[in-house]
Each structure stands twice: as structure tokens, then as C-alpha cells.
């Protein structure tokens, strides 16, 4: 019996899994699959459609505040950009006949607040769309929904008839951008603010100071930015511009000044604030460093009082982040004056000393009208309850803080710099289903933030590390908890990713640019094949495997690759289909064969390119691996198709070769290897099929195909 006749039996099991569980909140028959991200609280689709053509007009009922007017203009320009229709400028006078009618209950708060009402309702019929919200912020959110609903077919552009009621699950939905390790110019921040607004994120957490850079102008202490930034800092005027730009889009700006550790750049200019005499120089490496402010000296608090007085005015948000992470206190241990101070005051260890510092800082921030926030190291027994805990080391701290009455924000699980797949972030919930928090305790959990630490991103690559994955995190923080279907998330994410280019993001297009530069030419086809199936190594392994400093160019092959390879995920699904779905065996095997052939052929083509471009030398072993993966997969597929079981030596040799290919090179790895391994196992286990149930067989293939555990990197 051939494999082909067996395949119907083999994996009928996987069919049961594919049922798409839409949000419980989405009711009624949807005429089309929607592409909304985040999914709204409730959406009832109907059968009609509102045509969008060049007679599209917008009317506002009631007050038109400047932010609303600017938001309408931006939305119209984006509709024009997508549809190539030139639309009427300005607002229509007549609410009865306009295509889109907006109603805002008021302009919203002058300084955006965590309590801002972001809710809205959107009703689209075949005659008109009506968007209503208590404030302009809600209208802005609803306009983004409308832009996501805009669809097209042979008849033209349209918005499907729908009734949406929407509001966020969490009030704090943020993106942290570290502009200190690698400075990010204004246009990078602005396009990311536009993208945040497009997926309804509402907090830019601006990580402004670090060991590697002090990025904000201080008029009180100008040496800080003059000596601590290599000339790459934001002027106060630029900071105000970002705050205004963010507010226009309903986004708060929370600045972070990391203290008392991560503070080398402060001490370059002001070594007198440090716990060791110095001198200090701007740090060029990544990691945890010793320099820390001296918490025992009154001049330090005097300095911070003046500095935060200045920053409190510049950044109007109520919240101010003081960092507080990863201070190991080594300088404190070695400083006899600090040790003597601790003894006199009965301060038992460095944690208690940092809490002493934090409490002094809290008084300063309160004086300047700010609520203090810090990473979860500051969560120590003596910390006043008014401080907000930003959890990064694990979800436990957030729950513990909430139980003790502290407000908190979650970033553990949303570390997008670690290069994990979107699915891994998507399943992280600030209040998971097994949470033991009471309703009152759960209300202390304000939300979450994706964190873009910038050790390994340049202005050319940062978008590709943030997007599109952050759109899925945005959904987790906005949508009902029940919205969890991974396949549907990835389907909508692919659409969202392309639409995010409309606001100027470079996450898609810069890959080809980087490859052209590496290849020194336009012919990058084989390189594109390679980068489509490799990913940077996860967690902090990049720096171990391919050490660089903050001054190194970020223009290598690794920088052109992206997290969460679409091609790998598609290949895995097709291989799975091939092994599970007999009626489609031919179609799947043709698709798998085409892909494998492309990999096999790309190898030698890449070799020729690498010979011409020394910058590509890292790709040489990867080109060989890619060729190997293609060849191995094609052999396995041939065995499966012919129903011929290969000799045991073939399997041993192929699996050993795959193990070699699985070792990262140039800090890159192939996420497609488990699928190729699955093909090899399937081919070599064909003879066992008669003795196994389909379920057993599938389990066997999956188990045997699991990649070997790697240790040490
Ligand atoms: C952190 O990642 N050190 C907050």
C-alpha cells in the first residue's frame, strides 16, 4: 500500500483543530471575513455595503475641535492613498447626506489621561456611516476601525454594513521605545506614533536615558545631553513636538529616566553624583554596568529636584518612570561612606538602600505633580502604595503587586526585542484566565507595554522589530480576553502589516533595501529566499554569538532578517497538510516540492553572490544549509510519493545533517527545520503505518521530528 492511499487515514485528526473560533463577542452573519485588529468588543455585520467613491464626504454634528479636524484630514488622506480616489477637501455641511457622519461629545482632556474615555460606536448602513463617541479620542479610535473596514472587490471600494460597539479592555496600552542604546530620529518616532494609533495603542513610553546615552536636552544641566549623547539628543522643542504629535493621535507620552543604575551617561557629565569617583565614559557595550547614583548624598537629591522640576513641565503626563531596574549595587558595596551611611540609618541591604532612594525620589516627583512608576525591582516591602509597578521579570510580580494594592503594567511576555514569534506574545494576558485576583484587585492591572529595547536596532530596522508583532499585542490589550484564535490572528496580522505601511513604516520595504546594499546590486532573489526562512536567534543570544557594540553598523544579514518567518509558518502548515489531508495530497506536495526546489537552487546562486560581496560572507554556511534542506526535503518527498521506505542509513544521515543545519550561524537559525525533519521521519516510518492508528502515527512523527534540545549558546 502506498503512502498516498494511507494518507487519508493518517491524519484525519488535524482537521478537527482547524475550526476557527471567532470572538464570542462577534455576533451575526459576517458577509466577509473582517480584518479588524484589534477585534472590537462587539461587531454585528449585516449584508449591505456602503460604497466608497469620489463623492465620499464627511460631516460633523456638533463641535469640531482642532484635534478632530486634523484626525479627519489624516483619515481622508489615507483613504485617498489606498483607493487612488481624490476626495473633497473640508467638511460637508449636511449631516443627512454625508457618507460619514461624526459626533464627538467633547474635545477630550487637554493632557491625555489614563482615565480618558476611548469608547465609540460605529454604524454602517448602505447609505451612511455614523461614528459617535463621548470624546474626540473615541472618534479617532473609530476612524481607525473604519479604515480597517474599508474593503474592495470588482465593484469598487466599500465599507461593509456593521454595527460596532467598542471600548478597550485595559486603559494602558503602550509601546516602550529605547532611544538611548540607539538614538531614533524624530521621523522614526512619528511614524511609530501613527502606527500605534492605527492599532489603538495609547502610551509611548520614552526610555530616554541609559548607560549608553542621555537623549534629552536639559537647560538646567546642559552638560548632561552635551557630554552624554554623542550629539544625538532631542531638544526640548522636539520633545514638545512629540508630545503634541502623540496627543493629536490620542496617545500619552510617559518619559523614563533610569535611576539609580543604568546611569553611566548621567555621570559622564556629573561624576559628582556617582558612587565612585569616575571619570566615566559613555558605555558602548550592551549589558548591566556598575555606575549608580550615590543615594546617601543630599546634593544628589538637590540635583534631581531641579532636573525633575524641569522635566515635569516638559512632559505633562501625570506618570513619570524612574526605571530602577538592574542596579546590582556593586559601587555601593565598595564605597565606605555609603556603607557607613547604611549602618547609621539601619539600612540592611542594597534593596533597602534603593527603596530609601526611591522614597526620596517619590517626594520629589510628588512635589512636581507626578505619579512615580518603575520596573519591578522597586517593588520592595517599604515602597509606598501610590507607586506604579512595571513588571518585566515575570507575570507573578504584577499579580502580587495588584494583591497588595499597587497599580501595575505588564511587559513580561511583551519583550519584542527577544525575537519571539507573535503567537508567543499574543497568548500572554495581563490578567490570565487562571488569575486569582479579585475583581477589585484586577482593576489595579492597568494594562501592558511592548518593549523595544534598542541594542540591536537602527532607524532602518527598528520598525521591523516592532511591527507587525506589536499589533497583536495591541489586540491583547484592547480586545476581549476571548479573542485568542492564532490562525485568525495571523491572517489579520498579514493584512494589518501591509496597511501599516500606509503611515510610513519601513518594516516591510527596508528588507529589500538592506539586501540590495549587501548584494551591491538589484538581483537579490536568492537572498530573499534565504532571509525568508531564517530568523535571528532568540533572547540575548545574538550578542553572544555575534558580538557587537553600540557603534557597530547594523547592516548585516541578521539585520535584514525578521522575527517570526511567514514563509516558515506557511511551510509548516503545508507539510502538516501534506501529511494529514489525503484529498489535498497532490496540491500540498506540489507546493512543498516547489518550495524545496527553490531552497535547493538558491544555495548555489547564493554562493556566486557571496563571492562578489564580502559583506555577505556570513551567508556562506547558511547557503549550504539551505541547499541541504531543499535536497533532503525533496528526497523525503520522493519516498513518500512513491510509497518507498528509505534505508535506515538514509534517515540517520539526513537527521544528522539537519542537526548540523540547526546550529545557528551568523546568529541566524532556520525555523523550517522541524518541518523538514517531519518529512524525513514520515518517509522513514512509512513501513510502520500498517501497525498504527492514524493518531499514533501522527504522534510518532511529531515526537520523532521534535528538534533535539540545544544547550549553551
Ligand atoms: C529591563 O528590561 N531591564 C527593565
Image: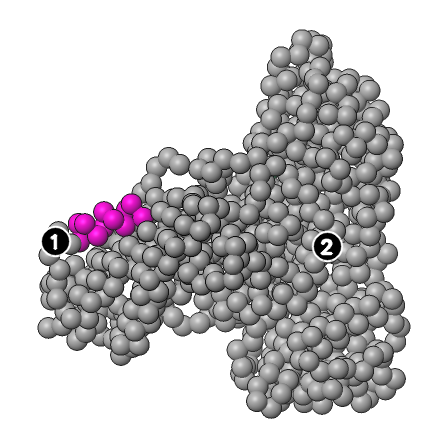
- Asked if one can make out residue 16 in the rendered structure from this viewpoint, the answer is yes
Residue 402 drawn at (x, y percent): 62, 43
Residue found at x 54% / y 39%: 393
Helix, strand or loop under label 1 = helix
Q: Is residue 295 above or below residue 380?
A: above
Q: Nearer the viewer, residue 239 or 227?
A: 227
Q: Does residue 558 show up?
A: no
| Residue 564, percent from left and from top | 47, 56
Residue beneath the point at 37% across and 53% down: 607
Q: Main secondary structure of the magenta part?
A: helix
Q: Residue at 39%, 55% (x, y): give it.
A: 608
Q: Nearer the viewer, residue 593 or 245?
A: 593
Image quarter (top left, top right, bottom left or bottom right) of the C terminus: top left
Point out which mark residue 187 bears.
2
Residue 65 occupies quadrant: bottom right
Magenta highlight on residue 356: no
**Apparent side of residue 690 relative to residue 381 in the rendered image (left or right):** left
Residue 170: mark: none
Could you tell me which quadrant the N terminus lies in?
bottom left
Which picture quadrant has residue 636?
bottom left
Determine contact: label 2, label 1, CB under 8 Å: no
Near-viewer residue (125 or 603): 603
Dot label at residue 648: 1
Where is residue 245 drawn, in percent x and y?
Answer: 79, 57
- In percent of width and height, residue 667 lies at 44, 43
User: Which of disc 1 and disc 2 is earlier in sequence?
Assistant: 2
Specify start and end residues of the magenta stretch as a single range.
Answer: 651-661
In-image side of 365 versus 485 (left or right): right
Comparing 129 with 261, the one in front is 261
Amino acid at each position: 500500500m502506498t503512502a498516498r492511499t494511507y494518507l487519508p487515514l493518517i491524519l484525519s485528526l488535524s482537521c478537527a483543530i482547524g475550526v476557527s473560533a471567532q470572538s464570542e463577542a462577534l455576533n451575526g452573519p459576517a458577509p466577509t471575513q473582517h480584518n479588524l485588529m484589534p477585534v472590537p468588543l462587539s461587531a454585528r455585520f449585516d449584508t449591505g455595503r456602503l460604497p466608497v467613491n469620489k463623492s465620499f464626504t464627511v460631516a460633523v454634528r456638533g463641535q469640531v475641535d482642532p484635534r478632530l479636524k486634523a484626525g479627519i484630514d489624516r483619515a481622508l488622506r489615507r483613504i485617498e492613498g489606498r483607493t487612488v480616489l481624490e476626495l473633497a477637501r473640508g467638511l460637508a455641511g449636511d449631516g443627512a447626506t454625508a457618507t460619514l457622519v461624526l459626533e464627538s461629545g467633547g474635545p477630550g482632556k487637554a493632557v491625555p489621561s489614563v482615565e480618558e474615555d476611548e469608547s465609540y460606536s460605529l454604524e454602517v448602513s448602505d447609505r451612511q456611516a455614523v461614528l459617535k463617541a463621548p470624546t474626540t479620542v473615541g472618534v479617532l479610535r473609530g476612524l481607525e476601525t473604519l479604515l480597517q473596514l474599508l474593503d474592495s472587490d470588482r465593484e469598487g471600494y466599500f465599507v461593509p454594513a456593521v454595527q460596532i460597539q467598542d471600548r478597550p479592555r485595559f486603559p494602558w496600552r503602550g509601546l516602550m521605545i529605547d532611544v538611548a542604546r540607539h538614538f531614533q530620529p524624530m521621523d522614526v518616532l512619528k511614524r511609530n506614533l501613527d502606527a500605534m494609533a492605527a492599532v489603538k495603542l495609547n502610551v509611548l513610553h520614552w526610555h530616554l536615558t541609559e548607560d549608553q546615552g542621555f537623549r534629552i536636552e536639559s537647560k538646567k544641566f546642559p552638560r548632561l545631553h552635551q557630554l552624554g549623547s554623542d550629539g544625538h539628543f532631542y531638544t526640548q522643542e522636539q520633545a514638545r513636538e512629540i508630545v503634541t504629535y502623540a496627543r493629536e493621535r490620542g496617545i500619552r507620552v510617559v518619559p523614563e529616566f533610569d535611576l539609580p543604575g543604568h546611569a553611566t551617561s548621567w555621570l559622564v557629565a556629573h561624576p559628582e553624583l556617582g558612587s565612585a569617583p569616575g571619570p566615566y565614559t559613555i558605555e558602548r557595550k550592551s549589558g548591566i554596568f556598575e555606575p549608580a547614583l550615590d543615594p546617601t548624598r543630599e546634593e544628589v537629591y538637590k540635583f534631581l529636584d531641579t532636573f525633575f522640576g524641569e522635566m515635569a513641565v516638559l512632559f505633562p503626563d501625570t506618570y513619570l518612570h524612574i526605571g530602577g531596574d538592574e542596579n546590582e549595587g556593586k559601587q555601593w558595596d565598595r564605597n565606605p561612606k555609603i556603607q557607613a551611611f547604611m549602618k547609621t540609618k539601619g539600612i540592611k541591604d542594597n534593596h533597602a538602600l534603593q527603596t530609601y532612594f526611591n522614597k526620596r525620589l517619590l517626594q520629589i516627583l510628588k512635589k512636581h505633580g507626578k505619579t512615580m512608576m518603575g520596573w519591578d525591582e522597586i517593588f520592595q516591602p517599604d515602597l509606598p502604595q501610590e507607586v506604579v509597578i512595571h513588571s518585566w521579570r515575570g507575570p507573578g510580580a504584577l499579580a502580587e503587586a495588584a494583591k497588595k494594592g499597587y497599580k501595575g503594567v505588564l511587559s513580561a511576555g511583551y519583550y519584542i526585542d527577544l525575537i519571539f514569534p507573535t503567537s508567543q506574545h499574543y497568548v500572554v494576558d495581563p490578567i490570565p484566565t487562571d488569575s486569582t485576583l479579585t475583581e477589585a484587585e484586577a482593576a489595579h492591572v492597568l494594562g501592558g507595554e511592548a518593549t523595544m529595547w534598542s541594542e540591536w536596532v537602527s532607524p532602518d530596522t527598528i520598525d521591523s522589530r516592532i511591527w507587525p508583532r506589536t499589533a497583536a499585542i495591541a489586540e491583547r490589550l484592547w480586545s476581549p480576553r476571548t479573542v485568542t484564535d492564532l490562525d485568525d490572528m495571523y491572517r489579520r496580522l498579514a493584512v494589518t502589516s501591509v496597511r501599516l505601511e500606509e503611515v510610513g513604516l519601513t518594516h516591510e520595504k527596508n528588507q529589500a533595501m538592506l539586501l540590495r546594499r549587501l548584494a551591491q546590486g538589484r538581483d537579490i532573489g536568492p537572498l530573499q529566499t534565504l532571509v525568508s526562512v531564517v530568523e535571528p536567534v532568540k533572547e540575548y543570544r545574538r550578542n553572544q554569538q555575534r558580538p557587537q557594540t553600540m557603534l557597530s553598523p547594523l547592516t548585516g544579514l541578521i539585520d535584514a532578517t525578521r522575527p517570526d518567518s511567514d514563509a516558515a509558518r506557511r511551510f509548516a502548515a503545508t507539510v502538516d497538510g501534506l501529511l494529514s489531508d489525503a484529498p489535498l495530497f497532490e496540491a500540498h506536495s506540489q507546493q512543498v516540492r516547489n518550495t524545496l526546489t527553490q531552497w535547493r537552487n538558491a544555495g548555489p546562486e547564493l554562493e556566486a553572490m557571496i563571492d562578489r560581496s564580502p559583506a555577505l560572507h556570513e551567508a556562506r554556511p547558511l547557503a549550504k544549509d539551505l541547499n541541504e534542506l531543499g535536497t533532503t526535503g525533496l528526497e523525503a518527498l520522493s519516498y513518500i510519493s512513491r510509497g518507498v521506505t528509505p534505508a535506515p542509513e538514509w534517515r540517520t544521515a539526513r537527521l544528522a545533517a539537519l542537526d548540523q543545519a540547526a546550529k545557528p550561524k551568523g546568529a541566524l537559525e532556520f525555523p523550517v527545520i522541524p518541518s523538514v525533519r517531519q518529512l524525513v521521519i514520515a518517509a522513514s516510518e512509512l513501513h510502520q503505518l500498517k501497525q498504527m492508528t492514524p493518531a499514533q502515527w501522527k504522534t510518532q512523527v511529531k515526537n520523532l521530528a521534535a528538534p533535539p534540545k540545544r544547550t549553551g549558546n
